[in-house]
Image (cartoon, rainbow, N blue to C red):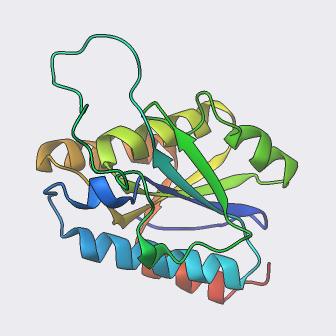
Amino acid sequence: MSVTQLDSKTALIIIDLQKIVASIPTVHPITNVVESASRLAANFRQHGLPVVLVNVIGMSPGRTERNQAGGGLPPDWAELLPELDRQPQDHLVSKSTWGAFTGTDLEAYLKANGVTQVVVCGVATSLGVESTARQAHELGFNITLAVDATTDVSAEAHANSLERIFPQLGETGTSKEINNYLSTRSF
């Protein structure tokens, strides 16, 4: 785990830190994940780098062996957590799949802004975060994953992503490492 480089046009992508997700029991306290992600967002904004806030608003079609969330959701379930301090310049991506690129304008937004690298964090490590990182990798972006700003509902799935998948997709590091790197560079 180490962050060796951030491109001059790096964007932060925060996955699914929204009201319904914050109510689900996770391996690591969601408050710690949200705090780490929020500090990253504030630092990216301070350096004039893009911040992408992603929320899930639906489910992919198709059958699965697990029950999918459905009726009975509170009306504000897809709202982003206020701790993220959404700013007018932040880009919102609302998705209906695990990954943030499928069926959204995320790729076009990043390319229009000259982004060559993404830092990805959020919930769940093995679903939305990993899927988005895989898609970014396939699209040719450099990737850094903020490991302390991610969590999952399963310790095994979280560990699998961190130990086996993420090192093949990019670099991993803590939000503190990423923030320290940003503070020592001019962007």
User: As displayed, is residue 29 above or below residue 118?
Assistant: below
Residue 166 shown left or right of residue 179 in the figure: left
**Rendered residue at 48%/74% (across/down):** 84
Extreme residue toward the bottom, this view: 184
Q: Nearer the viewer, residue 134 or 27?
A: 27
**Rendered residue at 26%/75% (across/down):** 31
Where is residue 29, by image quadrant? bottom left
User: As displayed, is residue 67 above or below residue 186?
Assistant: above
Q: Nearer the viewer, residue 59 or 148?
A: 59
Extreme residue toward the top, this view: 63
**Rendered residue at 62%/27% (across/down):** 103
Q: Nearer the viewer, residue 14 or 147?
A: 14
Residue 26 shown left or right of residue 172 in the figure: left
Q: How many marks?
A: 0
Residue 177 shown left or right of residue 153 in the figure: right
Tell me the quadrant of the picture where the N terminus can be found.
Answer: bottom left
Q: Position of residue 102 (x, y in %)?
A: 58, 28
Q: Position of residue 107 (x, y in %)?
A: 72, 39
Q: Position of residue 142 (x, y in %)?
A: 64, 49
Q: Nearer the viewer, residue 27 or 7?
A: 27
Residue 152 shown left or right of residue 43 in the figure: left
**Rendered residue at 40%/15% (across/down):** 61
Tell me the quadrant of the picture where the C terminus can be found.
Answer: bottom right
Q: Position of residue 125 (x, y in %)?
A: 32, 49
